[in-house]
Image (tube, rainbow, N blue to C red):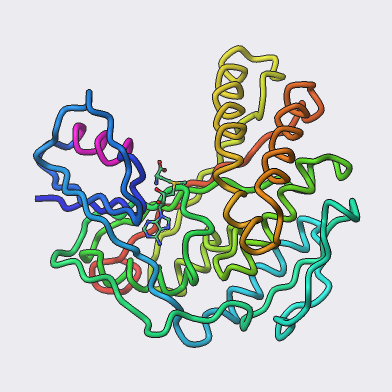
Amino acid sequence: MLWILDVGAGPGDWANGIADRYPKAKVVAVDAAVWETDETEPERKNVFWEIDDLDVGEVPGAREAEATALESQMQSMSIRLESLRGRADSKAEDLADTGQDQAVKLSPQSSPPLSEPRGWCFTTLFDFIHIRGMKGAFTSWPAIYAEVFKSLNPGGYVEVVDFETPLQSINPDSELRRLISATWEAAQKSGCALGTAHLDPAAFEAAGLMHVKTTTVDVPVGMWHEDEEQRALGKKWLVCCIEGMEAMCLRLLTKEMEWSVERVKEACRKVADEFLSGMHDGLTTPFRFVVARKTRNGAEG
Ligand SMILES: C[S@@+](CC[C@H](N)C(=O)[O-])C[C@H]1O[C@@H](n2cnc3c(N)ncnc32)[C@H](O)[C@@H]1O
C-alpha cells in the first residue's frame, strides 16, 4: 500500500489526479484553508482531506542559513539589498512613490518565530510527498524539510515544485517590476519569504535527502511565442498570472506595506494592461521540479 501526502493541496487538483492514477494508493491532502470543492467531482474513497497549518516555525539557526541563501538569490535578481541581518526596525520606503527598486531588508529577527516549534503529526509514513506552489507559505524551509524527512518511509520520495520570479528580465520601469519587488519585501517582513532558495539541492541534502534531481521548464508568459503549443501554454499561464496576482499581493501589501486595497487593485490592473499591451513579450517563467529521496539506509544506496 502506497501512502501519498499532498502538502497545501488547494482545491485538490493534484491529489485527485494522483488518486485516480494510483487507485490502490491512499492520498492525504492537507491545506490550511477550507476550499469550495467542485461538486461535479466524484468522491474518491482513497483521498483523505485534512485542514491543518503545516508550518512548523523555525529550527535553531535555520533562519540564518536561509537568509544567506535568499540574500544571494535577491542579489542575483538585482534587488538592492540595503541591509541584511539585524535591521528589523528599518522602515521600508514606499516603492511605488519612489519608482525605484526597493531595498529589501532581510532579517532573522524581522518575524518572530512561532512560540513553539511544532512537528507534523501524521500517524503514517509516506512513500511520496508532494509540495507544489508553496513558496511564501512557510516560516522556515529547513524545518519543513526536516518534517519531510521524518515523514517519509525509507526509500520514499519528495517532489517540490515552484516557479522562479524572473525579476532581472522584467522591464525595471514597469508596474510589474514594482509590484513584484514590493510583494517580495512584504513577504520578507511577514516572515515567510517568497524566494526559491528551498529549491536548491543543498537545501534537500542538508535535511538528509539524497539523489536530488532538478528539471526546469521555461514557460512563456503571454502569447508571444512562435510555436503554437508554447503560445497556448503561455496564454494559460498569463491567465493564471493575471487572475492570481491580486490573491498573491493583497494581504501582504495591505498588511505589511500599508498599501490600501484600492492601490493594490489599481497596481494589478496596470500590470494586466502591461501584459495585454505586449510590454512583457519575450518573458518566460522557469518552473523547477525538484525530486529527492530518503534512502533506505541513510547512505548513498
Ligand atoms: C498556490 S496554492 C497551491 C495549491 C496546490 N499545491 C497546487 O499546486 O495546485 C497554495 C496553497 O497552500 C495553502 N497553504 C498556505 N500555507 C499553508 C500552510 N502553512 N499549511 C497548509 N497549507 C497552506 C493555501 O491555502 C493554498 O491552498
Q: Which residue shows up at 61% across the image and 57% down it? A: 252
Residue 256, horizontal then vertical, whole percent: 65, 64
Q: Which residue shows up at 78% across the image and 45% down it? A: 177
Question: Left or right: 107 with respect to 114?
Answer: right
Measured along the vertical axis of the image, is residue 229 above or below residue 38? above
Q: Which residue shows up at 73% across the image and 47% down it? A: 179
Q: How many marks?
A: 0
Measured along the vertical axis of the image, is residue 44 above or below residue 181? above
Question: Left or right: 49 with respect to 117?
Answer: left
Measured along the vertical axis of the image, is residue 23 above or below residue 49? above
Question: Left or right: 177 with respect to 268?
Answer: right
Residue 230, horizontal then vertical, whole percent: 60, 20
Q: Quadrant of residue 147?
A: bottom left
Q: Main secondary structure of the magenta part?
A: helix
Give yes or no for residue 20 being in the magenta stretch. Answer: yes
The residue stretch that appears in magenta: 13-21
Q: Nearer the viewer, residue 266 or 157?
A: 266
Q: Nearer the viewer, residue 30 or 201?
A: 30
Q: Nearer the viewer, residue 193 or 270?
A: 270
For the C terminus, the image quarter is bottom left
Q: Quadrant of residue 293?
A: bottom left
**Which residue extends farthest top?**
228
Give yes or no for residue 120 being in the magenta stretch. Answer: no
Q: Which residue shows up at 25% across the image and 67% down it? A: 151
Residue 47, horizontal then vertical, whole percent: 16, 43
